[in-house]
Image (cartoon, rainbow, N blue to C red):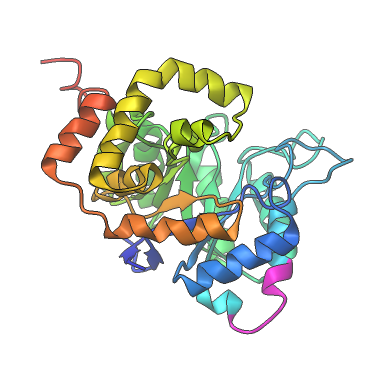
Amino acid sequence: MDYKHLGRSGLRVSRLALGTMNFGDATDEPTAFQIMDAALEAGINFFDTADVYGGPQTPDMDKGFGISEEIIGRWLAQGGDRRDRIVLATKVYQPMGLGRNDKYLSAYHIRRACEASLRRLQTDHIDLYQMHHIDRATPWEEIWQAMDQLMREGKVTYVGSSNFAGWDIATAQNAATSRHLLGLVSEQSLYNLTARTVELEVIPALRYYGVGLIPWSPLAGGLLGGVLRKMSEGRRASDQVQQQIEQHRPQLERYEALCSDLGEQPADVALAWLLHNPVLTSAIIGPRTVEQLKDSPRALDISLSQETLRELDDIWPGPGGEAPQAYAW
């Protein structure tokens, strides 16, 4: 396993991060325990979750919420050196109750959400506390005051963002600097060969401020994982995936043919393409089984030639570069 600093921080994390959104939903607890054990064995030290993961991602008192965190907490409670071996990341923003202040980024909600996550995770600190979405109704002075207090209390070590625009990252960093804080060390964004909008303004902002990129959905929900071959072997796809396949079939055919010529699995090529970007710290993988996890590290050993990178750009065009040159003189 390879490791890299999380943005400009001194913290080193694995180039592949274990995403746990499926825990409690598509993946049951015994299997989740096996996946986390296997991740440690593979050298993955970066575990990512969110307070809302493991269910419908909306408050549902029948199904509960915070399930993914609870599963991780019970895994950590087994003891040994599990907690000391991982960098534990979770998120705040989504509705966690039916009350008016049970969501978003008010200081009121941030404090209560953090305390609840700590209880579910059965730990005394969160290594990376991420804002799950931008909240433009709450001033940055309030947000950073709440985060600063949690850091002073030792409950949070680093702060990250997710789904921020480039100008949100700039605004957040300027507000943090005025308080003499480190500010953001990471940003989780949707980024893969099929979704490259962040190349316009988010990635340039991250590079300027020294914030590490952590892409989510690196395989586009399975679309880049060899979906055509799998369907030809008799595997079924959801209606949504089938619609995406029909929308992108010519590209998928070219992509999977290219991967075959390279002698590599499509999922590994998609991850390797992301990992070649110097702004990227870790790519989040969300295995549902131990077997899926064990296949992922192959991407770290793949070196894509300039010719291959150009062909991937031709198959999956980006926005044309960075703003404003992508659309103006």
324 drawn magenta: no
Q: Is residue 136 above or below residue 52?
A: above
Q: Is residue 106 above or below residue 118?
A: above
Q: Position of residue 68 (x, y in %)?
A: 69, 54
In the rendered image, residue 320, in percent from the top left (x then y), is placed at 21, 23
Please state if 309 lies on the left or on the right of 205 as rendered: left
Picture quadrant of residue 174: top left
Q: Is residue 9 above or below residue 310?
A: below
From the viewer's perspective, tell me whether residue 46 is left or right of residue 180.
Answer: right
Q: Could you tell me what secondary structure mostly forms the magenta stretch? A: loop
Q: 280 above or below 204?
A: below
Residue 317 visible, this orientation: no
Any part of residue 245 in sight: yes
- Residue depicted at 40% across the width and 32% down the height: 165
Q: In which quarter of the view is residue 118 placed?
A: bottom right
Locate residue 181, reporting x and y percent. Answer: 40, 57
* Residue at image location 34% in from the left, 54% down from the top: 299
